[in-house]
Amino acid sequence: MNITTGDFNTHSKEALRLCNTTGSRNIGIGSNSLSLNTTGDDNVAIGDSALYSTTGSFLTAVGSAALALNTTGNANSAFGYSALWFNSTATGTRLSDGVR
């Protein structure tokens, strides 16, 4: 576990704890969810690889690979398999039909 100063994080199995250093108030449920998050805060990732690449904040991803390639985008919501898969830096985007 790499958490140095982050508080109030919840994770399951290999989720979240891999790279998180200062991110706080994150929830990762599912294999590899929030895996590369280091500094993002207030994120919810539920599903295999949901929010995998993010360092953004205020994100909600529910579904396998939802927002998986998001890097620095903030305040996005994605619901469904691979929803907003290719979003990387957009902010304030919402998708609920599970289309890439």
Image: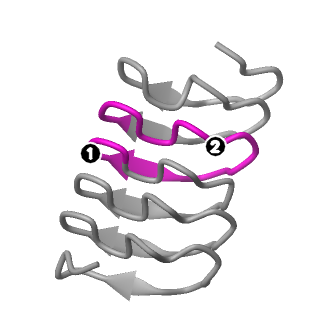
**Residue 57 placed where, x, y %?**
65, 61
User: Is 48 covered by the magenta stretch?
Assistant: yes
Q: Is residue 53 above or below residue 3?
A: below
**Residue 80 placed where, x, y %?**
19, 67
Q: Main secondary structure of the magenta part?
A: loop
Residue at position x 24%, y 52% in the image: 64
- Kindly identify which numbered label has been placed on residue 47: 1
Q: Is residue 11 above or below residue 82?
A: above
Q: Is residue 1 left or right of residue 61?
A: right
Residue at position x 36%, y 45% in the image: 49
Q: Is residue 82 above or below residue 5?
A: below
User: Is 58 covered by the magenta stretch?
Assistant: no
User: Looking at this view, is 11 or 88 the one in front?
Assistant: 88
**Residue 10 placed where, x, y %?**
48, 28
**Residue 24 placed where, x, y %?**
68, 39
Per the image, label 2 sits on a secondary structure element best described as: loop
Alpha-carbon neighbours of circle 1 within 10 Å: few (<14), some, or many (≥20)? many
Residue of label 2 = 37
- Highlighted range, magenta: 29-49
Q: Is residue 3 left or right of residue 17?
A: right
Residue 84, quarter of picture: bottom left
